[in-house]
Every structure is written in structure tokens, then in C-alpha cells.
Amino acid sequence: MEKELITEMIEKLRSGQINEWYVHKDEFLEIRAVIVSLDDFKHFRGIAQRSGDVIYQYLQEPRS
């Protein structure tokens, strides 16, 4: 997945344009590496799915 698309989806989550971002397991590690490098990474919640996919949400309050 291209970094521009990852950045665009992260911005949509932050702004509230989308509530969730469904990420396939093939793209998970690449996207996670970008999210972990962000200053507000604790605002992102990844919810694991049965198939290995992940749903990302952006929280207003950082997780502990």
C-alpha cells in the first residue's frame, strides 16, 4: 500500500470523516509501522478480527 494512501486514511480517521478503517492482514504490518511512528499513536485502537484483519478506530482520549 502506498504511503500517501495510508496517510490519507489516517487523516480521515483523525478528522472523523470515517469511523473505522478495515485493514487486511496483508497490509497490517506496513500500516502499523506508520501508525506507531505518529505522535498521537495512542489515539489509535486496532481491533483484531478472526481472519487476521484489523479494524482501526481513532479515539478522542488516548488509550493507556
Image: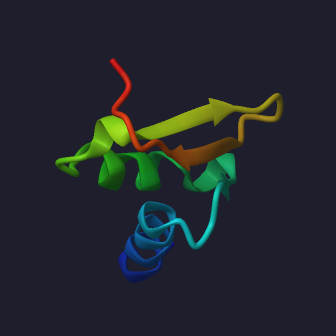
Q: Quadrant of residue 62?
A: top left
Say whether residue 34 is left or right of residue 52. Answer: left
Q: Residue at x 38, y 82 (%)?
A: 4
Extreme left residue here? 39
State the count of labels.
0
User: What residue is drawn where x is 44% and y is 69%?
Assistant: 15
Q: Position of residue 9 (x, y in %)?
A: 50, 71
Residue 47 vs residue 58: left or right? right
Looking at the rendered image, the quarter that the C terminus falls into is top left
Residue farthest toward the front in the current orientation of the protein: 60
Residue in the image at 44% along x and 55% along y: 31
The x and y percentages for residue 1 are: 51, 72
Left or right of 14 on screen, residue 19? right
Colouring convention used in this rendered image of the protein: rainbow
Q: Which residue is at the front of the view, 33 or 45?
A: 45
Q: Residue furthest top?
A: 64
**Which residue is the extreme one toward the right?**
50
Residue 49's place in the image compared with 40, above or below, is above
Task: Work out whether residue 26 or residue 31 is closer to the camera in this orientation and state it.
Answer: 31
Residue 32, given in percent of the width and then of the height, sits at 41, 46
| In the displayed structure image, the side of residue 1 where residue 42 appears, left or right | left
Q: At 46% across and 42% down in the image, what residue appears?
A: 59
